[in-house]
Amino acid sequence: MAIPPDPIPQASPGTSRLSKSKYLSGLQCQKRLYLEIHAPTLASAPDEQTQAILDMGTEVGELARRRFPGGVLVTADHRHPTEALRQTAALLADPAVPAIFEGALEYDRVLVRVDILERVASASGGPDAWRLIEVKSSSRTKDVHISDLAIQAHVLRGAGLSLDGTWLMHINTQYVYPGGPLDLTQLFSLQDLSAQVLALEPDVAPRLARMKTMLQAPLPPAIEPGSHCHQPYDCPFWNHCTKEKPARWIYHLPGNAQTVERLARQGVETIDAIPPDIKLTSVQRRVKDNVEWVDARLNDALSSVRFPVHHLDFETFMPAIPKFPMTRPYQTIPTQWSNHIETEGGRVRHEAYLCRDPNDPREEFAVTLLESLGREGSICVYSDYERTVLQRLADALPSLRADLTQAMARLWDLLTIVKAHYYHPAFAGSFSIKSVLPALVPDLSYEDLEIREGGTAARAYQQMVFEETDWVEKERLRDALLQYCERDTLAMVAVRKALAARAMETRHD
């Protein structure tokens, strides 16, 4: 029996007010825009990692306002647009206000909230002009930022404002924080994008017209999900739009998106239907074959490990606004490590470190780590990430460089061994530890943990050290962080043993 589609309310002519975020949604996919307007409950809630990014953007936006002393914030939120428009109009008319934050303006049923409107006084005594400034927590300009500024400029000009220019303010990753008060003129880069925005503005009105026409239709446009669903942002309706796709849908093929798009255009709907003459990578070929594969050299690869085996994992955070002297925005700061140590006799013990205070953790992190690692045995990691962190620690801590370099020489990457010598259909093309573990060790997972991935761990660390004041909540976050990092290294122990067992079974077959 066919499954009926989710009900979507009938569109009501003339009732849909657009915003700059909805305009950008419409540029990405008109079906996304339609669902945001008419069926927002079908969207998936942002996961914790996405929410952490949004929170970071809010923090950066609030800090950016300090570059404009005397500026005034429009306090009415998005639920009170009429009040926001009224407050903004009053501030625009007051020559004593040098800048307006979160100003609300509307034109042709499009409402925008502008991060910063800076007043540019007229030298001739005529009406003041305004500099439009969009604040982003990113470290570079992207195409979507130009579109973001273009819709705002279109509305502002339509509302009668004279624009002196359109600018992007973003994080300057070359700024080295010396300590003390932040130098906001160095932390933020200001980029004049007036020419690019002006070139794009003529496209805004016809695009808006097409969106508004589309929104009057009784049903959303018939747009198939694809790679556009993830560029420039992940669409919150992905789960809704793909829920009836087959388990072996072609877009589940890992690797180059262009290959997938080409196959989809040729009418290939599932991985199983890929023609045999299509050139695929080794990983894609294993996904297509959909059978367990054990390379004859797996046992030799696993036997290259030296005891005692240290199973090592790091957790880090990358604050957009630097916290410690002599660090840069978005610099990777290691905050905790976990080490499961296995002796040749099979005994396993666990050691761990987690920084709990707001001081720079790097030296204490390195000293405690080196003590745990000793000078013997392989250091099992899963990816090259730990090597990168160790190298940066060696650069930052000259007194420990030799010991950290010695530790790097002992690294033994389990991920490269899995990729080269083993595949299981349950991987579904992914070699992340969270895909490999349940396939090889079904009894061990991350499902019982409060924190289940690195982005959430970074956000929890930020909360525990820099935001939370309640000691009970601090302890809860501490326990959750320790449990998550410990699970990562325990997973490596379990995967190593499971792979060894599969290698032995294959040799005996």
Image (cartoon, rainbow, N blue to C red):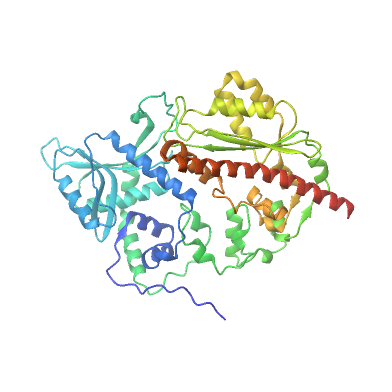
Q: Position of residue 404 (x, y in %)?
A: 64, 25
Where residue 442 sits, quadrant-wise, is: bottom right
> Which residue corresponds to the image point at 33% horizontal and 68% vertical from the top-left?
213
| Furthest residue in direction left, as rendered | 125
Q: Is residue 121 above or below residue 252?
A: above
Quadrant housing the C terminus: bottom right
Q: Is residue 199 above or below residue 216?
A: above
> Which residue corresponds to the image point at 68% horizontal and 46% vertical from the top-left?
491
Horizontal placement of 54 versus 305: left or right?
left
Q: Nearer the viewer, residue 26 or 394?
A: 394
Horizontal placement of 419 versus 179: left or right?
right
Q: Position of residue 321 (x, y in %)?
A: 41, 34
> Which residue corresponds to the image point at 46% horizontal and 43% vertical from the top-left?
473
Q: Nearer the viewer, residue 329 or 21?
A: 329
Quadrant housing the N terminus: bottom right
Q: Is residue 281 visible?
A: no
| Furthest residue in direction right, as rendered | 508
Q: Is residue 402 above or below residue 493?
A: above
Q: Nearer the viewer, residue 441 or 259?
A: 441
Where residue 175 sits, quadrant-wise, is: top left
Horizontal placement of 264 versus 150: left or right?
right
How many numbered dots are placed on residues in this image?
0
Q: Position of residue 452 (x, y in %)?
A: 57, 49
Where residue 133 sits, quadrant-wise, is: top left
| Furthest residue in direction top, as rendered | 399
> Which residue corresponds to the image point at 66% horizontal and 29% vertical from the top-left?
372
Horizontal placement of 329 versus 157: left or right?
right
Q: Is residue 52 visible?
A: yes
Q: Position of residue 485 (x, y in %)?
A: 60, 41
| Furthest residue in direction bottom, as rendered | 1
Q: Is residue 434 above or below residue 43?
A: above
